[in-house]
Image (cartoon, helix red, strand yellow):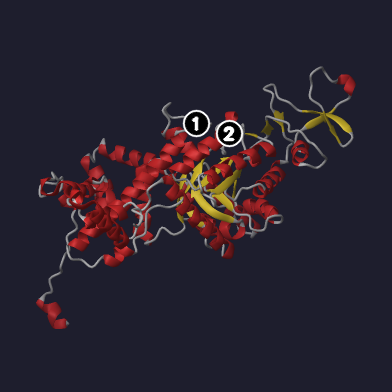
C-alpha cells in the first residue's frame, strides 16, 4: 500500500483506488479523482514537513551564493498570514518562480501588532507563543494559496483546457521563513522550548541575538546589553538541539550580534586561562586602575597586565565597554558564533553603507572564508538621506562644485531631480547586489515593510474617502488598480476560499451541496472577459 501523503496526482489517485478496493462499498461515495485532487492541494501535512523542505532550499541557496555572490536571496517582513500569502502570490505572478525569495518574521512586528497586551516596543515583552502562532498562520495561508491555484487548474482541466503540464509542474507558495526568536525569551532551556515550537510550526531558520533576554532592545535603539560568548553559545546549542530532536538536521541558525551599537554588559564572565573567550570579553570592559587601599568593601576588581583595575559599573549594576571597541567586539562575536554552530551572521549597523559592512565582514572572512551575512535593509535608516550624504562626500572628493547643495537639507524635494539625487538613487537601487558582492551579504531583508505600507495606504485612502473624493478614492486608488494589475484578492470571496469550498462541498454532498458560486454572486463582475477585436474591411484589405 502506498503512503497516502504522496503528492503526485497520479500516485495519489492510485493510492485512493487501492484504498477503495480495500474498504469496498462503504467507500463507494468517495470519488478517487476528487480525493487525489485534495491530497495534491496540500503538499505539506505538518510544519516539520515544511521545515525540512525549506531548510533544504536555504542550504542549496547558500551553496549557490558561495559559487556566485550575485545569487543572493531576499525577503520582506510579514505580520499576518494574508500579507505573506499575497506577497508570494505576487512573486509567482511577476517572476514565475519563488526561487531565492523568502519570508521574514520580525519580532518587532510581533510586538507591535500581534500581542494580546496591545502594541508594544521591541523589548521581548510580547507572549512567546505569538511567534510560533504567526509562523503557523503564515504557512496555513500559503497552503491555502496552493489549494486555490491548484483548484482553479483542476477546474480548467475538467472544462477541457490543456493545463496538465501546469498541474504537473506546479510550484508551491511555501518558501523559507527566517524567524526572529529575539534573545531567546529566557535562559537556554526557555530558548530550546520556544525554538521547538517554532520549528514544529514550520520555521527552518531561526535568528537569535546576543542581548540579555530581560533587557532586550530593538537593534536600532540605544540601551542594548550584550551577554558573554559562553551564554550566547549555550543558546546556539539549544536551538541546534531543538532542530536535531525534531529531525531537521540541516536547520539554519542566524547569529545576530548587537555589539556595534551596544555599550553595556550585565555580566563579567569567569576566565579560566589567559587568552580564553572570557578573557577576551573582559579585555573590552572599561576599567580604572586602583590600589587596594582606596577600594571600598564589596567592589569587583580585576587584574589586567599586572595591575589592579576596577570595572566601571553604573548605578543599575551594568558594566561599560571601552569606547571604540565595538567593531572588534562585532568581529569576535561573529567568528565565535560561526565556530560554535551558527550558519549565518546578522550585524546591525548604524547606516546602510556597503564599505562599513564590508570592513567588518572581511575581517571575519580572514578566519572563516565562507562567512555569510543576513542584512537588515531597515526602515529605521533614512535611506534617502544616508545615500545623498554618501554621494555628496563622493562628489566633493571628485572635485565637484557643491555650492548648489545645502548639506544640512539634502532631503529637500527641490533636489529630487538633481545629479546628486540621481546618483544616490542609483546607489540605493544597486545596494543589495553591491553588498552581496562586496560585503558577504547572502540574504537581504526588510524587517517592517508591510507595517509602513499599511500605514501609508490607509493615510492615502483616508484622505480621499473622507474628503471630496468620497467613494472615488477607493475605486480609483484601490479597486481599479487591483483590476488593472491583476491583484488576486480583487475577487476576495475566491481568495478567502469560497470557490475551493464550493468544490469541496460538491465532493462531500454531491448535488445536494449549497454553493456560494452562481449567477447571483457579485464576484462574477470581476470575471476577465476575452475581447476579440473586430477586423475592419480596411484592415482586411491592407492585410
**x then y, percent, for residue 198:** 48, 40
Question: Considering depth in this image, is 137 or 77 the residue closer to the camera?
Answer: 137
- Decide if residue 13 is on the left or right side of residue 395: left
| Disc 2 target residue | 189
Query: Any mark on residue 121, and which?
Result: 1
For mark 2, does the 10 Å Cα neighbourhood hold few (<14), some (14 to 19), or many (20 or more) residues?
some
Is residue 451 at least partly visible in the picture?
no
Looking at the image, which is closer to me, 339 or 327? 339
The reply to whether dot 2 and dot 1 touch (C-beta < 8 Å) is: no
Give neighbour class at mark 1: few <14, some 14-19, many 20+ (Cα, 10 Å). some
Q: Secondary structure at mark 2?
A: helix
- In terms of depth relative to the viewer, which is nearer, 331 or 185? 185
Q: Nearer the viewer, mark 2 or mark 1?
A: 2
Q: Is residue 465 left or right of residue 264?
A: left
Instruction: Give how far across and how far down residue 87 sits, in percent.
Output: 37, 50
Q: Secondary structure at mark 1?
A: loop
Can residue 10 be seen from the camera position used here?
yes
Give the residue at x 73% y 26%. 313
Amino acid at each position: 500500500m502506498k503512503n497516502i501523503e504522496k503528492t503526485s496526482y497520479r500516485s495519489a489517485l492510485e493510492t485512493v483506488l487501492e484504498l477503495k478496493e480495500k474498504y469496498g462499498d462503504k467507500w463507494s461515495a468517495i470519488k478517487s479523482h476528487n480525493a487525489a485532487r485534495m491530497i495534491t492541494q496540500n503538499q505539506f501535512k505538518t510544519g516539520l514537513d515544511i521545515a525540512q523542505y525549506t531548510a533544504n532550499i536555504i542550504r542549496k541557496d547558500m551553496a549557490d551564493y558561495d559559487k556566485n555572490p550575485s545569487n543572493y536571496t531576499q525577503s520582506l517582513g510579514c505580520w499576518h498570514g494574508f500579507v505573506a500569502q499575497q506577497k508570494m502570490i505576487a512573486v509567482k505572478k511577476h517572476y514565475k518562480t519563488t526561487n531565492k525569495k523568502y519570508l521574514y518574521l520580525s519580532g518587532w512586528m510581533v510586538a507591535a501588532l500581534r500581542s494580546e497586551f496591545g502594541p508594544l516596543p521591541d523589548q521581548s515583552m510580547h507572549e512567546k507563543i505569538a511567534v510560533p502562532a504567526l509562523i503557523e498562520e503564515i504557512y496555513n495561508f500559503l497552503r491555502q494559496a496552493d489549494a486555490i491555484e491548484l483548484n482553479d487548474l483542476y477546474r480548467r482541466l475538467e472544462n477541457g483546457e490543456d493545463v496538465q503540464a501546469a498541474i504537473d509542474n506546479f510550484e508551491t507558495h511555501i518558501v523559507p521563513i527566517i524567524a526572529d526568536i529575539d534573545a531567546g525569551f529566557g535562559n537556554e532551556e526557555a530558548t530550546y522550548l520556544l525554538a521547538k515550537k517554532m520549528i514544529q510550526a514550520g520555521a527552518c531558520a531561526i535568528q537569535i541575538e546576543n542581548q540579555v533576554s530581560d533587557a532586550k532592545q530593538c537593534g536600532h535603539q540605544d540601551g542594548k546589553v550584550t551577554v558573554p560568548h559562553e551564554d550566547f553559545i549555550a543558546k546556539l546549542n539549544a536551538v541546534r538541539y531543538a532542530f536535531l530532536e525534531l529531525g531537521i538536521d540541516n536547520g539554519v541558525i542566524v547569529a545576530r550580534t548587537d555589539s556595534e551599537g551596544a555599550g553595556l554588559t550585565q555580566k563579567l564572565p569567569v576566565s579560566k586561562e589567559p587568552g580564553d573567550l572570557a578573557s577576551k570579553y573582559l579585555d573590552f570592559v572599561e576599567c580604572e586602575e586602583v590600589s587596594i587601599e582606596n577600594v571600598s568593601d564589596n567592589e569587583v576588581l580585576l587584574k589586567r597586565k599586572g595591575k589592579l583595575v576596577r570595572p566601571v559599573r553604573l548605578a543599575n549594576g551594568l558594566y561599560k565597554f571601552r569606547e571604540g571597541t565595538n567593531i572588534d567586539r562585532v568581529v569576535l562575536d561573529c567568528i565565535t558564533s560561526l565556530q560554535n554552530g551558527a550558519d549565518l551572521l546578522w550585524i546591525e549597523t548604524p547606516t546602510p553603507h556597503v564599505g562599513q559592512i564590508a570592513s567588518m565582514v572581511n575581517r571575519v572572512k580572514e578566519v572563516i572564508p565562507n562567512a555569510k551575512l543576513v542584512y537588515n535593509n531597515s526602515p529605521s535608516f533614512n535611506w534617502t538621506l544616508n545615500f545623498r550624504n554618501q554621494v555628496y562626500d563622493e562628489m566633493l572628493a571628485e572635485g565637484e562644485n557643491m555650492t548648489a547643495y545645502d548639506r544640512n537639507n539634502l532631503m529637500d524635494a527641490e533636489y529630487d531631480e538633481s545629479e546628486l539625487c540621481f546618483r544616490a538613487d542609483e546607489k540605493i537601487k544597486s545596494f543589495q547586489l553591491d553588498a552581496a558582492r562586496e560585503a558577504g551579504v547572502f540574504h537581504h531583508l526588510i524587517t517592517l515593510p508591510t507595517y509602513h505600507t499599511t500605514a501609508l495606504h490607509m493615510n492615502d485612502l483616508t484622505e480621499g474617502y473622507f474628503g471630496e473624493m468620497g467613494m472615488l478614492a477607493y475605486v480609483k486608488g484601490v479597486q481599479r488598480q487591483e483590476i488593472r494589475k491583476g491583484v488576486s484578492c480583487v475577487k476576495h470571496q475566491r481568495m478567502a476560499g469560497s470557490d475551493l469550498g464550493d468544490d469541496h462541498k460538491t465532493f462531500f454532498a454531491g448535488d445536494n451541496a449549497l454553493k456560494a458560486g452562481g449567477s447571483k454572486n457579485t464576484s462574477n463582475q470581476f470575471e476577465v472577459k476575452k475581447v476579440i477585436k473586430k477586423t475592419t474591411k480596411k484592415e482586411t484589405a491592407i492585410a
